Image: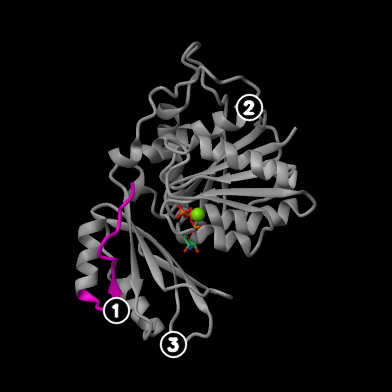
Amino acid sequence: MISSFVITGFLGVGKTTMLTNSVKENFGDKKIAIIVNEFGDVGVDSKILKNVHSEVLEISEGCICCQLAEEFEAGVTEIIQKYDPEIIFVETSGASEPFPIFLSLQNMGISVDGVICVIDSKNFSSYKENSTAKYQLGGSNIIVLNKMDLVNETEIKELEAEIAEIKAEYNIRNTMTNEPIFKNYVTHRAEQGLVGKELFEGVYKVEEVVEFAQDSTHLDHTLKDSITQKVAYLKEDINFADVDEILENVPESIYRVKGVVKVKDVPNAIFVNYSFGDASFEELLDYEDKSLLIFIGENVDKEVTALTKKYDILNVPKFSISRG
Ligand SMILES: Nc1nc2c(ncn2[C@@H]2O[C@H](COP(=O)(O)OP(=O)(O)OP(=O)(O)O)[C@@H](O)[C@H]2O)c(=O)[nH]1
Ligand SMILES: [Mg+2]
């Protein structure tokens, strides 16, 4: 039987970083396939993941938990037929809930060995009120407290207490029996998504058939929590400092920016990866397309328009469709 892990967690918490840094390390001897569903219709994560893993399937332009169940199942079937993986890792979009994906995998006869919720330990308080973030915790049985480098022990203790509370309230239950689907959960700490193999070792396997679980309450949260995205393009004649300046002036309501940019003073294109005020950059070989940034958050239309007025190197296409 093929086994799988679902990796959930809010926007920018470190899901892709975990897949990049931990999976090959721990499963170098296995045939791994990765499915990634990204919020934002430009597949930045799949480009990053393809640098490290050979079989990466990207499902973009929507959320696999509400609109794309069929596309997701077709993608899983395709990757199984083509590649015959032993383990499938699914990175859900930061705005998805894991439970419907868990059900889809189970319905396809794939064993779900764990639903991993990655937490941004530094920025948890900025996003913990978001209902999707709460359901992500409730629907998982392995919790990874990531970005440990940015918090101290007192903050970690507070975080663990808050998580335990949310976890208890939002735990996914079987509506027939009212029993929690996950009888228990484990918490691991991580930096740069690095975790040991024991995290994945199948003690958490969910044997129960969970068709009756509480998924009728699943709402279209992408609309409810009004997280939207907007793509903006950058002019060609720019330097790295120009990009950095824009990132330093991103308003708080935009908590995630991703993109690829080409600048005059760096030979290769650069991945831009910004979440909650912190940015990281990585060089990328062989990128021939335009320089672009995807802004994700609340009030995105208004805020990105304001940024384009302030920085004339940044512009949005006149007729673009914003997706939730
Ligand atoms: N300081 C610090 N930064 C981290 C750590 N893990 C990840 N990051 C940074 O956090 C940002 C987001 O990481 P990703 O792995 O892209 O996050 P994600 O959860 O896949 O994001 P989405 O797919 O957009 O929801 C990047 O800039 C990473 O470099 C960590 O442990 N410490
Ligand atoms: Mg990602």
- Asked if ligand 1 lies within 8 A of label 2, the reply is no
Q: Residue at x 45, y 59 (%)?
A: 42
Check if residue 318 falls in the magenta segment: yes
The mark that comes first in sequence, 2 or 3, is 2
To which residue does mark 3 refer? 264
To which residue does mark 2 refer? 206
How packed mark 1 is, by other alpha carbons closer than 10 Å (few <14, some 14-19, many 20 or more), is some
Residue 76 shown left or right of residue 258 in the figure: right
Q: Residue 280's spot in the image, x, y percent?
A: 46, 69
Q: What residue type is labelled 3?
A: Lys
Q: Residue 15's spot in the image, x, y percent?
A: 53, 52
Q: Quadrant of residue 265?
A: bottom left
Using the image as rendered, state which of residue 133 and residue 168 is in the foreground: 133
Instruction: Choose mark 2 or mark 1, whichever is in front.
Output: 1
Q: What residue type is labelled 1?
A: Ile
Kind of element beneath mark 2? loop
